[in-house]
Amino acid sequence: MSEPAVYSGWQSERSGFIGNLSGVGFTLVAAASLTALVPIYTRFWGSAIVALPLAAVFLALAYGRVLGLTAVEWIVLAVRHQIAVASRKNLFFSGLFAPRRAADDAQPMDLPGPLARLRILEAPDGLGGRLAVAHNPIEGTYTAVCRVTYPGLALVDTEKQTGRVNGWGAFLRSHCTEDGAIVRIGVHQRSMPDDGGALRSWTERHTSPDAPAAAVEALTELMASAGPVATVRETYLSITLSSSRARLAIKGAGGGQVGAAAVLVREISAMHGSLSSAGLQVVEWLDPRGLAQAIRTAYDPEAHLALGARATATENPQWAGAARGVEPELAGPAATETGWGLYRHDGGWTVSYQVRGLPRSDVYATFLQPLLRPRQTARRSLSITYEPIGPGKARQELAREKTKRQTMRAVRAKTGRAESEDERREANTARSQDVARASGHGVLRFVAMIAVTVTDLTELETACAELQADASAAGLELRRAWGAQDAAFAVAALPLGQGLPDRRVGI
């Protein structure tokens, strides 16, 4: 029997202005240098009493760290947050709470924060159904979302496990083309506690009237004990198309939003074979009401049970004739409040984290499983967003990374500094990635975000501690999204393929 495949070699993206310094950090270092030279140029040594401490403050702001952020970044976030609180911009009200527009007496868009720009469009899926398309007019992107199922990896033999992982890798690699139309591929999974209501309802409807009393009693006891510890999992796949990259194809399909939707439908239709090779089964491509439901249940955890009962209208007579899903106008929350390290939305409280460090040692394909471990009092969401990079750009990126690391190693060698094992390993990883790229492998950027949501505020800190413990068991380093919980929620808790900004290239 062959050994399970192991995976490693992830590299953190560096986007400093010079080295690891941001533009503000570089300005502070330059200011510190000039301030320290003031006593020399003025030949007034008494000014050193003020100049040197001031220079030290500038350097502390540039290089000091506060919970993973530089001191100046922390101060900027804190000031921005306090301004938002003072101007009440951290609050969002929709529906009956929102003021009406004087011009057209219409309600404003009901998605808060960075999602306010999104529009849910509708397009034919080519099979007689309707497909929801989330349009971002600022970025010029169109996103389609599907719900998928998968057989899992934990209980299969090594050959099948490796084959499924390789199939997913081949699916991602197929989109690493030069100026490809698909710019983001998102994977989103939720793990939600289930009170067993749906299971008990199904059991009552399917229990025979002449069933033995002892069997019914035993089944009732089983439902009472096993139902509340059940967990519901939902997995979504999002595909995002760039209108700028696909402008010729969009023009050929009629242009505008209609042409963009047609090109997106054509792209996702061509993916079914590669998704099947990866072991993924597409349950459905979400229509506008289905996508609105996925958004609504993230903002309002209590709505999940009611909407789940409506989804099984054929087995629930009280919901007979009711349409599945939610109206797109009601997708967003009724009200939200963004705190410094907490996001309150309808009946839930959420804390979002960014994965800042991946395992440095070799890991198996199942190393992320602890993150979605069932919990009775909290729901968890994990989003991974990929950005395929074309061969030409990947060659430039990896060459720049290799040059930067080789230059730093040469400088350390000239100054007599010993090279650490971490630096040597990172250099070897950069070299091996360039070799793999030259051999035909794809290169991707990706970001991973995790959110934990509770409906009882007293359970929040316990849920956060459990999540961090499970992340540590998986070899991950998490950082709380301080000062940006609303934006982090949009990435971590919603299946909309958000979360990858343009890369800032340093000097």
Image (cartoon, rainbow, N blue to C red):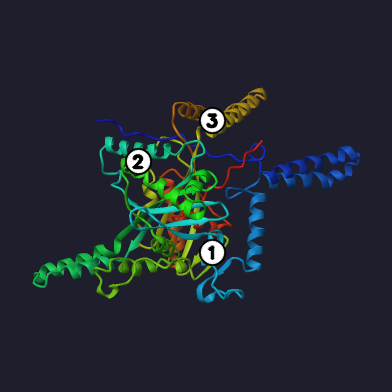
Q: Are marks 1 and 2 in contact (CB under 8 Å)?
A: no
Query: Mark 2 belongs to which amino acid?
Result: Ser
Determine the CA span between mark 1 and mark 3: 39 Å
- Observer able to see residue 262: yes
Task: Tell me where residue 268 appears, x and y as whole percent.
Answer: 39, 47
The mark lying in front, picked from 3 and 2, is 2
Q: Tag 2: Cα neighbours inside 10 Å, few (<14), some, or many (≥20)?
A: some
- Observer able to see residue 497: no
Residue 322 in the image: above or below residue 10? below
Q: Earlier in the sequence, mark 3 or mark 2?
A: 2
- x 36%, y 38%: residue: 364
User: Camera-side residue: 64 or 336?
Assistant: 336
Q: Quadrant of residue 190?
A: bottom left
Q: Tag 1: Cα neighbours inside 10 Å, few (<14), some, or many (≥20)?
A: many
Q: Secondary structure at mark 3?
A: helix
Q: Earlier in the sequence, mark 1 or mark 3?
A: 1
Q: Which residue is mark 3?
A: 395
Task: Tell me where residue 8 appears, x and y as whole percent.
Answer: 43, 35
Query: Mark 1 belongs to which amino acid?
Result: Pro
Query: Mark 3 belongs to which amino acid?
Result: Arg
User: Camera-side residue: 319 or 433?
Assistant: 319
Q: Which residue is mark 1?
A: 112
Q: Secondary structure at mark 2?
A: helix
Please give the label number shown on residue 89.
none
Left/right placement of residue 210 relative to residue 26 reads: left
Q: Quadrant of the C terminus?
A: top right
Q: Quadrant of the N terminus?
A: top left
User: Camera-side residue: 105 or 312?
Assistant: 105
Residue at the outermost right position: 43
Q: Are marks 3 and 2 in contact (CB under 8 Å)?
A: no
User: Camera-side residue: 183 or 375?
Assistant: 183
Please give the label number shown on residue 274.
2
